Image (cartoon, rainbow, N blue to C red):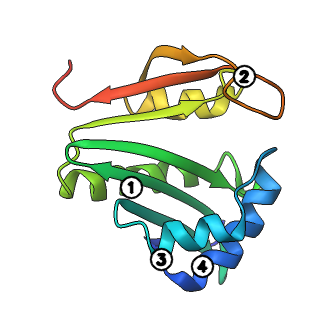
Amino acid sequence: MNWIRIRRTTPDDVDAMSDLDRICFAAPWTRGDFEKEVGQNILATYMVAESGGQLIGYAGIWVVIDEGHITNVAIHPDRRDQGIATMLLSELLEAARQMGARRFTLEVRPSNASAVALYEKFGFRTKGYRKGYYGDNGEDAAIMWLFEDED
């Protein structure tokens, strides 16, 4: 495996993030969505994973007071199951903690077993569901939470 670098996102990453989103998700964000998130949203922090000069993953979070809401975690299909998502999520959560986040939430497709397992590895637990959350097929979303003070 090539060396992997995790770093904060810059506006120069927007095109590659948008391209990766189209590869990874049935309902991808637009380039404009990424421009707003990276360049204008003061609540948002994004990290990217690079290898061999290519963006191979990204992850984002919004931090509002003491709560972090993970927006997306995307890894190129050719680079999955190599620990990259774990590296990205670890760096992202640490950055959010430094901004004051002490509890974290996200929505995930229950059918995405690898994503659910990733989040559970970090201590996230399913606390509820959003009915029909995913517009592409009407699948519910599992709402997962991680509380820093929970045992």
Position of 119 compared to 140: left or right?
Answer: left
Q: Quadrant of the C terminus?
A: top left
Name the spot of residue 50 as percent of width and height, x first. Answer: 59, 73
Alpha carbon of mark 2 to alpha carbon of mark 1: how far?
Answer: 24 Å
Q: Which mark is residue 39?
A: 3
* Mark 4 surroundings: few (<14), some (14-19) or many (≥20) residues within 10 A: some
Instruction: Give the residue at mark 2.
Output: 111
Position of 58 compared to 60: left or right?
Answer: right
Q: Which mark is residue 92?
A: 1
Q: Is residue 49 above or below residue 27?
A: below
Name the spot of residue 46 as percent of width and height, x first. Answer: 46, 64
* Mark 2 surroundings: few (<14), some (14-19) or many (≥20) residues within 10 A: few
Mark sitting earlier along the chain (3/1): 3
At horizontal 78% and vertical 23% (from top left) the residue drawn is 138
- Residue type highlighted by circle 3: Gly
- Residue type highlighted by circle 2: Ser
Instruction: Give the residue at mark 4.
Output: 13
* Mark 1 surroundings: few (<14), some (14-19) or many (≥20) residues within 10 A: many
- Give the label, 1 or 4, closer to the camera: 4
Mark sitting earlier along the chain (1/4): 4
- Quadrant hosting residue 21: bottom right
Alpha carbon of mark 2 to alpha carbon of mark 4: how far?
Answer: 29 Å
* Mark 3 surroundings: few (<14), some (14-19) or many (≥20) residues within 10 A: some
- Residue type highlighted by circle 4: Asp
Mark sitting earlier along the chain (2/3): 3
Residue 93 appears in the figure: yes
Q: Which mark is residue 148?
A: none
State the SS at label 2: loop
Alpha carbon of mark 3 to alpha carbon of mark 1: how far?
Answer: 17 Å
